Amino acid sequence: MRLLLIHTSGGEGSVALAKGQEIVAVEVLPGRSSSERLVPAVRRLMESNRWVLSDLKALVVVHGPGSFTGVRVGLSAAKGLSEAGDVPLIAVSRLALLGAAAGEGDKTVHAVLYAGRGEFYYGEYFGHRCVREALLSRDEVIAAVAGASIVACEVKVAEALPELHPMLVEEPSAGDALPFALERIAANEFDDAALLDANYLRRTDAEIFAKPTAKSAVR
């Protein structure tokens, strides 16, 4: 069983090839160069291993949250390759990979990424099962975590939430999506490329435009 895995949602992108449960090839896309290097990197890995799209059991993409451009580039490329080769598509959340990096197994883990402007991408996981994901303020993250384990891969998160003592790990790579992909394949759960959207975790219009309840005037 051969898989192509793509991750361009973080600060550093990567592409990987997997055969069964083993990662057989990896190429790192340094910095914010994913948009220019992604497709050539996929081509080099496939050609050097003498693979073609029709060999693939599935194509796996990390579809955010993270860099708007990186998420869009990775997802667009994955959709295009999926359609061109008639290959099933599997999307995995970057927060899910981060949660798995904590190695807590059967315990609840809270994964946090910096979203800018004082907000955070937040995910709560139990093993590989997502309990919820959301875009939260600093105070909302503190309330949601409530003393449980928190994992992050960005120094900004540790600096912004020092009282939570987050576990800092390396940015997840494309290959880290393999266990999630294997579970999805075993369950025959694939994504519809036509309907699949980026995992941006934006706030809803109701949340953005909601006004606080006016307090009674003090006389």
Image (cartoon, rainbow, N blue to C red):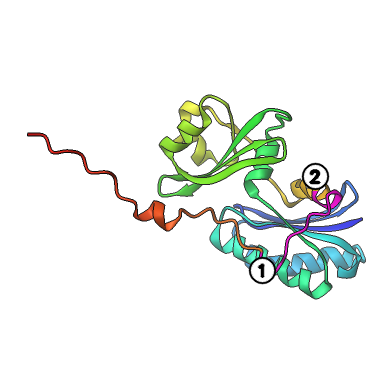
Residue at left 66%, top 68%? 76
Picture quarter containing residue 104? top right
Q: Position of residue 106 (x, y in %)?
A: 72, 28
Which label was assigned to residue 22? none
**169 shown above or below 41:** above
Which residue lies under the disc numbered 1? 76
In the image, 108 versus 158, the foreground residue is 108
What's the distance in space between the residues labelled 1 and 2, CA to CA?
Answer: 23 Å
Q: Amino acid at mark 1?
A: Ser
Query: Going by the image, does 175 lie left or right of 166?
Result: right
Q: Position of residue 134 (x, y in %)?
A: 53, 46
Which residue lies under the disc numbered 2? 179
Q: Position of residue 125 (x, y in %)?
A: 65, 37
Helix, strand or loop under label 2: helix
Q: Position of residue 217 (x, y in %)?
A: 13, 38
Residue at left 72%, top 32%? 103
Picture quarter containing residue 200? bottom right
Residue that sits furthest to the bottom in the current view: 84
Residue at left 66%, top 66%? 195
Kindly report the secondary structure that dominates the magenta region of the rendered protein.
Answer: loop
Helix, strand or loop under label 1: helix
Residue that sits furthest to the top in the current view: 147
User: Magenta residues?
Assistant: 184-195
